[in-house]
Image: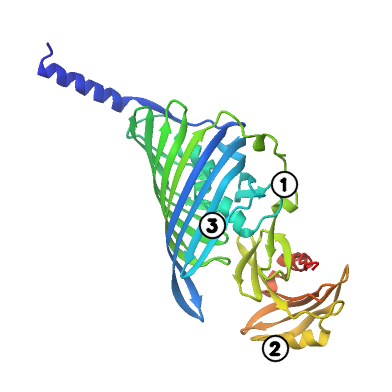
């Protein structure tokens, strides 16, 4: 028979051995690894915008859901560096004020390459150009490349802590560049073959030219037998300053991630051509909702405004604002005709707030194919600030027309280079 004191000693010994047990909290990703993911995201908070010169707060709520299979193609820094993802589904729904926006990946855009780079996550579709919304669907919610980097990469005991590395923090924060990182991990429990760990702290970084501060409170589950993270609940508060392509915001987000290892590779992944992206695969695609024009463009251009007749894009170079392009649908002319130079110049002279001081260029730009492009560029002042504006009239062989204005500060002319003209030359009109 056991005495009461003996039983107490046995219980204490068992508890003590469990607390003292070490768990090898490490993943070793390798090329060929397969996993299935389900990721759900919910967001709520406020955007801070200016309407008619007055600051306004706009409520935002959003949800997103992603289901995909990922194959690791290469690893670096103890994390997957390049992978191919086959999406079963990717959807997002947002309510901004009273405006609702829903997006889903089309059936022909299901295979993506995702790569961690020094400048952040770079994704492209194997099938070719995608829209900005489709690119955001696969690259702006949570990047599971960071998962192995959240771990200490060694044996630890319950209660032990570790610092999360900068590469993992940048990937988890979806930053183009990292400024500061104080994320800390802690092993909190080991039970039934599952180690539970926490990630807390804050980090700062730059995304699309805007400074972002994130505060993190996350809990993950690590399956000891397989040596892999199988679940993660990632909560963050997001304090974002106004950037050249996005408004200021204060948001709270929750990511719920489920992950399971796969033994067999889906045939779509096995047959996918894997290599460096073609020029077209890196491009984005835009089509006017009324079918008046369309174009493919480099992803450094960001759409920042859209109405029935206007589309506004801003060019960012490593987060720095370079120039703004405004595309305006113009009245259609007869087939083979276009607006006269005099008509175009009259419209330019009526641009509100624009005071030209010196003409830089006033001429047709040769295009061919029955297309006509006229360009009028000048230095002057916009709202009493020094500026350079290049006004363009583009016409197609069937009389379709758009006006494109590219505005910038004088010191940004060299940085813009030929990219403004390249954007205009890419505009196409429907054959109908």
Q: Identify the residue under disc 1.
A: 277
Q: Earlier in the sequence, mark 3 or mark 1?
A: 3
Q: From this viewpoint, which residue is outermost toward the top?
A: 1
Q: Which numbered disc, 2 or 1, marks the residue that appears first in the sequence?
A: 1
Q: Residue at x 48, y 58 (%)?
A: 212
Q: How crowded is mark 3: few (under 14 residues within 10 Å), some or many (20 or more)?
A: many
Give the percent coordinates (x, y) of residue 220.
40, 39
Residue depicted at x 57% and y 39%: 69
Q: Distance between the residues labelled 2 and 3?
A: 38 Å
Left or right of 42 in this view: 278: right
Residue 229 location in percent, x, y?
46, 35
Q: Is residue 369 visible?
A: yes
Q: Is mark 1 on a helix, strand or loop?
A: loop
Q: Residue at x 17, y 19 (%)?
A: 9
Residue at the front extreme?
Answer: 432
- Assess disc 1: are there few (<14), some (14-19) or many (≥20) residues with their C-alpha within 10 Å of its C-alpha: some
Measured as percent of width and height from the top left, residue 309 is found at 66, 76
Q: Name the residue under label 2.
A: 350
Q: Nearer the viewer, mark 2 or mark 3?
A: 2
Q: How many neighbours does mark 2 have within 10 angstroms: few (below 14), some (14-19), or many (20 or more)?
A: few
Nearer the observer: mark 3 or 1; the answer is 1
Q: What element carries label 3?
A: strand
């Amino acid at each position: 028979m056991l005495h009461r004191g003996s039983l107490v000693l046995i219980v204490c010994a068992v508890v003590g051995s469990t607390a003292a047990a070490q768990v090898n909290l490490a993943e070793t990703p390798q090329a060929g690894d397969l996993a299935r993911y389900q990721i759900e995201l919910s967001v709520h908070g406020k955007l801070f915008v200016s309407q008619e010169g007055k600051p306004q707060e706009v409520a935002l709520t959003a949800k997103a859901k992603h289901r995909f299979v990922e194959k690791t193609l290469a690893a670096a820094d103890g994390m997957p560096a390049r992978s191919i993802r086959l999406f079963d589904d990717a959807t997002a729904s947002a309510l901004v004020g009273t405006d609702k926006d829903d997006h889903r990946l089309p059936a022909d855009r299901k295979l993506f390459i995702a790569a961690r780079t020094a400048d952040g996550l770079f994704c492209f579709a194997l099938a070719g150009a995608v829209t900005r919304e489709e690119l955001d669907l696969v690259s702006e919610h949570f990047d599971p490349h960071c998962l192995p980097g959240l771990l200490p990469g060694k044996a630890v005991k319950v209660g032990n802590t570790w610092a999360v590395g900068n590469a993992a923090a940048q990937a988890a924060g979806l930053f183009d560049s990292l400024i500061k990182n104080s994320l800390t991990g802690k092993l909190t429990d080991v039970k039934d073959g599952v180690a539970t760990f926490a990630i807390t702290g804050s980090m700062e970084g730059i995304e699309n030219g805007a400074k972002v501060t994130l505060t993190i409170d996350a809990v993950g589950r690590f399956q000891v037998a397989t040596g892999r993270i199988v679940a993660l609940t990632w909560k963050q508060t997001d304090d974002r300053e106004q950037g050249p392509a996005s408004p200021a915001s204060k948001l709270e987000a929750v990511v719920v991630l489920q992950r399971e290892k796969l033994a067999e590779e889906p045939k779509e992944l096995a047959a996918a051509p894997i290599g460096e992206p073609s020029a077209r695969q890196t491009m984005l695609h835009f089509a006017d909702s009324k079918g008046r024009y369309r174009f493919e463009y480099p992803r450094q251009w960001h759409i920042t405004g859209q109405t029935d007749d206007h589309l506004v894009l801003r060019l960012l170079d490593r987060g720095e604002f370079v120039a703004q392009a405004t595309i305006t649908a113009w009245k259609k002319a007869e087939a083979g005709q276009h607006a006269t130079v005099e008509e175009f110049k009259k419209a330019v002279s009526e641009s509100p707030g624009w005071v030209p001081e010196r003409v830089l260029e006033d001429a047709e730009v040769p295009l061919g194919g029955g297309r006509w492009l006229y360009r009028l560029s000048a230095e002057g002042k916009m709202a009493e600030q020094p500026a350079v504006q290049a006004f363009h009239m583009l016409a197609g062989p069937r009389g379709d027309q758009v006006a494109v204005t590219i505005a910038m500060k004088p010191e940004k002319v060299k940085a813009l280079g030929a990219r403004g003209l390249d954007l205009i030359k890419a505009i196409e009109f429907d054959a109908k």
